[in-house]
Amino acid sequence: MSSVEPAARDATETLMGFVRTLRAAGVGADTGRAAAFLRAVDTLDVTRPEPVYWAGRLTLCSCGTDLARYDACFVHYFGTRPAPARTTRTVSTTVPAMWNPPAAAEGDDADTTGLLAAGDTEVLRSADIASLTREERAEVARLISRISADRPQRRTRRLEPAAHGRLDHRRMLRAALRTGGEPLRLPRRHPSTRARRVVLLIDISGSMSPYADALLRLAHVVVRGHPRHTEAFSVGTRLTRLTPQMRVRDPGAALTAVAEAIPDWSGGTRLGGELKEFLDLYGRRGAARGALAIIASDGWERGDASLLETQMARLARLAHRVVWVNPHKAQPGYAPLTAGMRAAWPHIDEFVSGHSLDALEQLATAVIGGRHEGGGPRA
């Protein structure tokens, strides 16, 4: 079955694409069943349609109503329909050889939260957040709350004692006076570091709604870890400062307060106007000056793109680095072609996806933690 073989993606991504197609059609293919499907296919000849078909039917379908949808999705996705089995009994004899059922009960995906095996968790970590079920989103939310975001540092002009660095002549001379003019040690010093401010602007418009909750939860992790050096805002049709709400330590209570504070959930996007308001009210006062500025948005600008370009240029002059998080970047063949992305692109230092749990962890540890160096937008 040539269509199952990886072309632009590897076999796992191809099969997970099929799982997402089933979910969109209403089949209850939760994370546990997806992991069982991958384990089953790993033991089969994926060049033949029949084994893959039955592996998916036995692991991904949770009730009788799923069967017709599964068949239709299989034909649509793989472009072929395998021959039917002779009897149901004959097919069922293959189940013990290739299926390790998930912990959830038959037809019940709610029990998967907190019960994911190591292999199941790996599937969940790399899955696109927009494709997850409600129960899987709850598990991702729990895992996001456990992320430990590094605190970005900046060098200062102040020098401090150190084991390596330039010679500290004053300390050396003072020590030499106590030893008869002979310096017994060569004290050194190097520049000290301080926490760098982080500013997060999260797009909560309709087009970003599948990802907004996860991104806000990550913002809470960053604010909670470094409350004195982090500011968080939502952008949509208006700008809302969320830092006070996100200083609440409990994630559930913090996100409830955030939801009550945001008046423009799932509306339009006026990035240019909201960024101008942020820079006018907060940026020049120091919130953006020398900061790591993170904008999470898909770039669907409803307003004037030229205004967004002007404000991005202002932000780039004030901030230390500008990071743009666009969940659609992970899609095969993505290019920043929307008006908002084209306007912002020349002023972006880092371009990341943030579409999955793995991507959010990398954003927290590598990007916010300052482990990425160099200039120019990273693809």
Image (cartoon, rainbow, N blue to C red):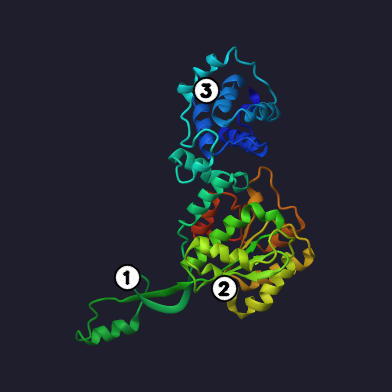
Residue type, numbered disc 1: Ala
Query: Which numbered marker is on residue 163?
Result: 1
Under tag 2, what secondary structure?
A: loop
Sooner in the amino-acid sequence: mark 1 or mark 2: 1
Residue type, numbered disc 3: Leu
Which residue is the site of mark 2? 290
Q: Nearer the viewer, residue 48 or 139?
A: 139
Q: Position of residue 167 (x, y in %)?
A: 35, 76
State how far apart marks 3 and 1 are (Cα). Answer: 59 Å
For the point 66% across and 60% down, the residue is 204
Disc count in the image? 3
Q: Position of residue 343 (x, y in %)?
A: 74, 61
Residue type, numbered disc 2: Gly
Q: Is residue 369 above or below residue 109?
A: below
Q: Residues within 10 Å of mark 1 (few under 14, many from 20)?
A: few
Under tag 1, what secondary structure?
A: loop
Residue 175 appears left or right of 201: left
For the point 60% across and 56% down, the residue is 213
Query: Which numbered marker is on residue 173?
Result: none
**Whether residue 372 is visible:** no
